[in-house]
Image (cartoon, helix red, strand yellow):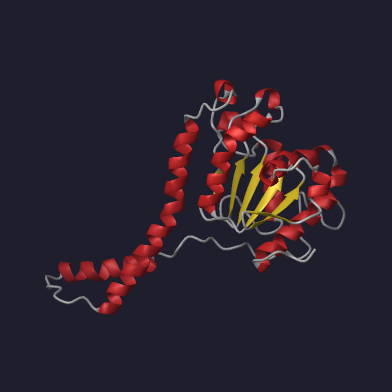
Amino acid sequence: MSEEKAVGMVADSPPDTLPNTAPDRADLFEALDTIGNYFASGMRLTHVPEELLECLRSATAATAIAGEPASALGALQAKANVCSACMLSASRKTVVFGQGAPAPEVLVVGEGPGAEEDNQGLPFVGASGKLLDKMLASIGLSRNENCYIANVVKCRPPNNREPAPDERVACMPFLREQIRILKPRVILCAGRTAAQALLETTEGINKLRTRQHDFGGIPLVATYHPSALLRDESLKRPAWEDLKRLRELIALGQPANE
C-alpha cells in the first residue's frame, strides 16, 4: 500500500483507541469501605444514609450487568466444548470458541480455525492473526479491549478446507447466540465464507464488500480475509476502504452514507 501503509495499516487520521467498556467499581468499593469503617470503629449503623445506599445499589447493579455476558459466554462455551453435531468434532484437537472483550464494539467473524488455532484454542493466530490485529489497530480496535473474535465453525476442517454447508448449519446456533450475548455495535465479516453464512447468500466477497448490510439490526461490513491480503497485495487498498467504513459506523453509531 502507499499512503495508507495499513494492513500493516496506519489510518490517515485514526481516532483515539476506543475505551474499555468495563464499569468503574470505585463507587462500590467506596460504599463498602464506608460501611466497614462503621463496624470497625464499634459504631452501630442504625441508619444508613440514602445516598450511600443508592451508591451501593448502582455500583452493585453495574458490576452484575458486566458479569452477565462473560458468564453466559462461559456456559455457551461449555456446550460447544462437548458438541458433536457434525463430523468436525471427530478430528478436532480444540474447540476454538472465541476471544475478546465481553462487551465489544466490534465482533469479527472468520471462517473457521486453522492448524495453529486448533493447537492453541484461539482464533486468528499466526500470520493472518497478526495482520488482523494490525488492521484492527489502525482504526483504534483491539481484541483485548473492544473487539471479540469468533468463527462460523468452532472446529478445524481437515486440511483447512472450507466448512461444508452442513457443518456451517450445525455450528451457526453457537455464533448466533454469541451475537445475542455480546450485542456488538458492528459486525465485521473477514472473508467470503463468514459473510455468506451470516447474510445467507451465495454472492461473492467482491460484491458483498461494496454494500452495507444488516444482521438482526446490527450493521455488518464484509471485507477480505487477512490470508487473502497476504496472498494478493492488490487487495490491501480496498480492504482499507472497508476498514474506514467500519470506523465511520463505530463513530456514528449508525450506518454510514454509501
Find residue 187 and report its horizontal and vertical position in percent. Answer: 65, 52
Residue at 68%, 51% (x, y): give it: 188
The extreme top residue here reads 90
Please say if 179 is above or below 48: above
Front one among 85 and 181: 85
Asked which quadrant contains residue 98, the reply is top right
Query: Which quadrant of the rendered structure holds the C terminus?
Result: bottom right
Q: Residue at x 75, y 41 (%)?
A: 192
**Residue situated in front as seen by the camera: 101 or 64:** 64
> Is any part of residue 252 visible from this angle?
yes
Q: Residue at x 52, y 26 (%)?
A: 84
Q: Residue at x 12, y 73 (%)?
A: 44
Q: Position of residue 182 (x, y in %)?
A: 53, 52
In this rendering, position of residue 164 left or right of residue 61: right
Q: From the top left corner, tell me how far across and down residue 37 is, in percent.
A: 21, 69
Q: Is residue 205 left or right of residue 161?
A: right
Instruction: Confirm whether residue 113 shows in the render.
Output: no
